[in-house]
Image (tube, grey):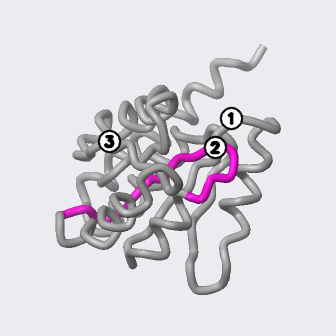
Amino acid sequence: MAIIIGSETDLNHAKTAAEVLAEFGVPYEVHVLSAHRTPIETIEFARGAERNGFSLIIAMAGKAAHLPGVIAANTTLPVIGVPLNASLNGLDALFSIVQMPTGVPVACMAIDGAKNAALFAVSILALKNADLKQRLLSYRESLKKGSGKKDL
């Protein structure tokens, strides 16, 4: 799977997603591509993603946040968009990603929701991977156990 960020300044968000994927044993690559600064390379990456062995893409972007949409417009792979808080508390990015036109869907996570994007990716991949599904179920069980410890 691929994690795409629009700028090296977004690497901390990519690392958050990467840590989750690594925890589940999901191979990934992180690429810096920009819908605005490197549009040709971004489109080429999206068009070749499936041929290059990717099964889904997490695309993170702030401000105008066109990156997830440009990628989704150029592949049939599932694209998970993560709006980043780069300006206007991330609302500009959220609106850019969540309001994709009909026919070019992008799943949209919460602002700075890199961890949930990775977990959502794992749940998609687990549809056809029993081992991954079991690890995801164990992870969810651990969340239940952890929440009970907070009772007073």
Circle number at residue 30? 3
Residue 36 screen position, x and y as percent: 53, 54
Specify few, some or many for label 1: CA neighbours under 10 Å numbering under 14, 14-19, or 20 or more: some
Q: Which residue is drawn at 57% across and 25% down?
A: 146
Q: Quadrant of residue 112?
A: top right
Residue 102 screen position, x and y as percent: 65, 84
Between circles 3 and 1, the one closer to the viewer is 1
Q: Which residue is drawn at 48% across and 37% down?
A: 7
**What residue does disc 2 label?**
62
Q: Which residue is drawn at 82% across and 38% down?
A: 88
- Secondary structure found at label 1: loop
- Secondary structure found at label 3: strand
Per the rendered image, the range of residues in magenta is 53-66
Q: In this view, does 76 lie to the left or right of 51?
A: right
* Identity, as a three-letter code, of the amino acid under mark 1: Ala
Residue nearest the observer in this picture, 21 or 39: 39
**What residue does disc 1 label?**
86
Q: Which quadrant of the figure contains the C terminus?
A: top right
Q: Are marks 1 and 2 in contact (CB under 8 Å)?
A: yes
Residue nearest the observer in this picture, 20 or 59: 59
Q: Which residue is drawn at 32% across and 42% down?
A: 30
* Identity, as a three-letter code, of the amino acid under mark 2: Gly
Circle number at residue 58? none
- Secondary structure found at label 2: strand
